[in-house]
Amino acid sequence: MWQITNDGKSSSPDWSRPSIPSQRVETLSILKNGSGSGVVTSNPAGIDCGLDCSETLDYASVITLTADADVGSAFTGWSGACSGTEDCQILMDDVKSATATFFDTNVDADDDELPDYWEQQILRAYPDDGIDTIDDVLPEDDFEGDGLTNREEYSRQTNPTDPDTDKDLYTDFEEIQASSDPLSFDSLISAYEQRSPAITGGANHVVALKMDGTVYAVGSNGYGQLGDGTALDSGSPVRVSGLVDVTAVAAGDGHSVALTDDGTVWTWERMGRVSLAMVLPQTALRR
């Protein structure tokens, strides 16, 4: 259709497309730090740093970053928009930047027989404890107090910031003393069978006595038979509250029993309250 202008002349219609507001985008930048080398990639694809270390992404999109060290290097952690040592997810609600640090595994700048890359995990774990540089990480120190020096932790490749590297409720030191592998989490039952003085099962729960005289339980807890003061089931072992110096344990359908070294028998059920059952002579098995 032709249009008539104010001056009486005709003109052709405007067929141009209306402008569409542009989608908001944000920029993600990746930096690399340290004496080593490696590559940072992303999912969805876009970052390959390497060569491509910056990407423009839709606002509010989520991107996952993965750091892979080259041979002879170790990835020691993120900083900036990421933290820790695992894959990192970033919500792109603003301009973001993340730094991946790689260390040459052969570098030992302070000449203490602990490679710099390995010492970084201690520096990250104790940022406010006066442990500020690799010079503060001493081979004969035991930072987390598990009985193993940093030199021993490095030699065995256990975690110097966690006394129980494999999360099986036994410290690395306890497992080494028992000739067990502190880096390998066996199945729950086999681990307890190998390292506990006693293990017993009820209808749907298991009670285990550790070598140090403490007691742990796992499984159904509807009657409080796990002894943790709740009625919540647990797929991981929980410590029975208040029991020490235990020498024997037993379990029933909905209750558990322990004998301490002074001849006292304790039982727990009904919301997990550990209560005195009886006192027996030292030669008896119950109290």
Image (cartoon, rainbow, N blue to C red):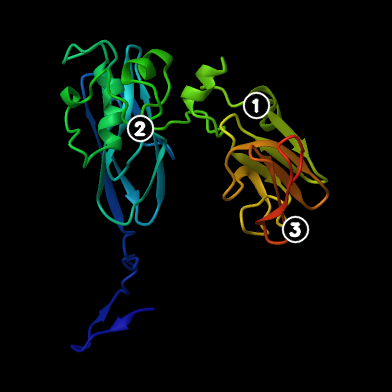
Q: Which residue is painted at 48% across and 25% down in the image? A: 172
Image side of residue 275 versus residue 168, left or right: right
* Numbered disc 2: secondary structure: loop
Q: Position of residue 161 (x, y in %)?
A: 36, 32
Q: Are marks 2 and 3 in contact (CB under 8 Å)?
A: no
Q: Position of residue 279 (x, y in %)?
A: 71, 48
Asked whether residue 89 is in view, the answer is yes
Q: Which residue is painted at 30% across and 54% down in the image? A: 25
- Circle 1 packing at 10 Å, graded few (<14), some (14-19), many (20+), is some
Cα distance in 3D space between marks 2 and 1: 23 Å
Q: Position of residue 37 (x, y in %)?
A: 27, 19
Q: Which residue is mark 3?
A: 223
Q: Which residue is mark 1?
A: 191
Q: Amino acid at mark 3?
A: Tyr
Q: Which residue is mark 2?
A: 144
Q: Which residue is painted at 31% across and 72% down in the image? A: 14
Q: Amino acid at mark 1?
A: Ala
* Numbered disc 1: secondary structure: helix
